[in-house]
Image (spheres, helix red, strand yellow):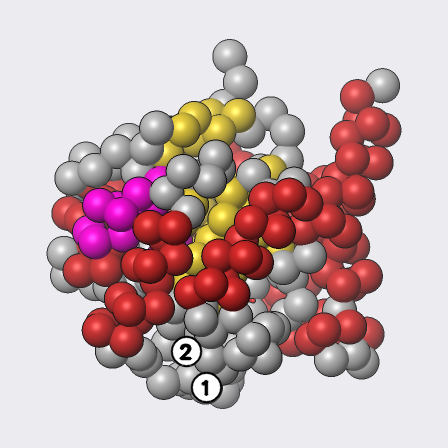
Amino acid sequence: MSQVLRCGKFALDLSRPLIMGVVNVTPDSFSDGGLFGETARAVAHARRLIGEGADILDIGGESTRPGSAPVNLEEERSRVLPVLEALADCGVPVSVDTRKPELMRDAIAAGAAMVNDVTALSAPGALEAVAASPVAVCLMHMQGNPGTMQVDPSYRDVVREVRDYLVRRVAVAEAAGIARDRIAVDPGFGFGKTLEHNLALLRSLAAFGSLGAALVAGLSRKAMLGKLTGREPRDRVYGSVAAALLAVQNGAHIVRVHDVAATRDVLAVWQAVKNN
Ligand code: 7PM
């Protein structure tokens, strides 16, 4: 029996790597330059990513960019809900990227099949919001908070500490009534990590496979790739697909990416070589 991730009415087969396409509904997103701030633009972008081969979409209305300020609930709600409603029957599971329990509940009611939370359901009421539904959750590790997390990230043993945190959050989620086949974990590349921390996590990603949860990796266009290539976010596609390939090679089940078409081709080549 191959591993599955249950997300609402969907059951994702994890025996092949899956692509989660990023759809930002934030006016200040570094990746989309604010072009997709409007509902119609975000929905069009989402449909394009599905056409390019996205297996999951991740809709976010709050930038968690290093140094960013929190967005209030009403603002985030008005960005995200119309997009979710328009994508309710798009054919792939749609994830909502939020830390706010109120929005989790509304998003699930609007058809979201997954909650992607960079704080791993740590807000009061977040565990309950997900547990009361059949949706999946992605529990991500972050050191600190987006406002200050890149100031001076520090670990004794980054792989061990991130892994221990995710083991604890999976246990907490399970105790709250979220079965392990609804849980994904993510080491949170760039979230309170230096380049060396990120490289250590990517090198040792296989250590996260034994948690019995789906493993998500998000490296797409991130600053670590800028440091390695000297390129601006929009020119980090080659670095991003290299990173996605390495993540899948090291056991990631789901890669969270902006460049779906490029990632799909790279993974098709990986899959063919692996199948022999
Ligand atoms: C600026 C910097 C804007 C970084 C946006 C980002 C992840 C995530 C993000 C991740 C999971 C981005 C990030 N990254 N959720 N949300 N894993 N689960 O590159 O790595 O989109 S925001």
The type of residue carrying mark 1 is Gly
Question: What mark, if any, has residue 218 been given in the picture?
Answer: none
Tell me, yes or no, whether the highlighted magenta stretch contains residue 117.
yes
Residue on which disc 2 sits: 146
Residue 133 is situated, as x and y percent measured from the top left of the image, at: 21, 38
Q: Residue at x 75, y 39 (%)?
A: 267
Residue 122 lies, with reference to residue 12, above or below; the image says: below
Q: Residue at x 43, y 26 (%)?
A: 11
Q: Are the residues flagged by discs 1 and 2 in contact, CB closer than 8 Å? A: yes
- Location of the C terminus by quadrant is top right
Residue 17 in sight: yes
| 43, 164: nearer the viewer | 43
Residue on which disc 1 sits: 67
Magenta-highlighted residues: 105-118
The type of residue carrying mark 2 is Pro
Tell me, yes or no, whether the highlighted magenta stretch contains residue 67.
no
Residue 140 lies, with reference to residue 151, above or below; the image says: above
| 14, 153: nearer the viewer | 14
Of the residues under marks 1 and 2, which one precedes in the sequence? 1
Q: Residues within 10 Å of mark 2 (few under 14, many from 20)?
A: some
Element assignment for label 1: loop
| 35, 1: nearer the viewer | 35
Residue 95 is situated, as x and y percent measured from the top left of the image, at: 41, 49
Residue 134 is situated, as x and y percent measured from the top left of the image, at: 26, 33
Q: Residue at x 30, y 38 (%)?
A: 135
Q: Residues within 10 Å of mark 1 (few under 14, many from 20)?
A: some
Q: Is residue 110 left or right of residue 240?
A: left
Element assignment for label 2: loop
Q: Is residue 152 left or right of residue 104?
A: right
Q: Is mark 2 within 8 Å of ligand 1?
A: no
Measured Cα–Cα span from mark 1 to mark 2: 6 Å
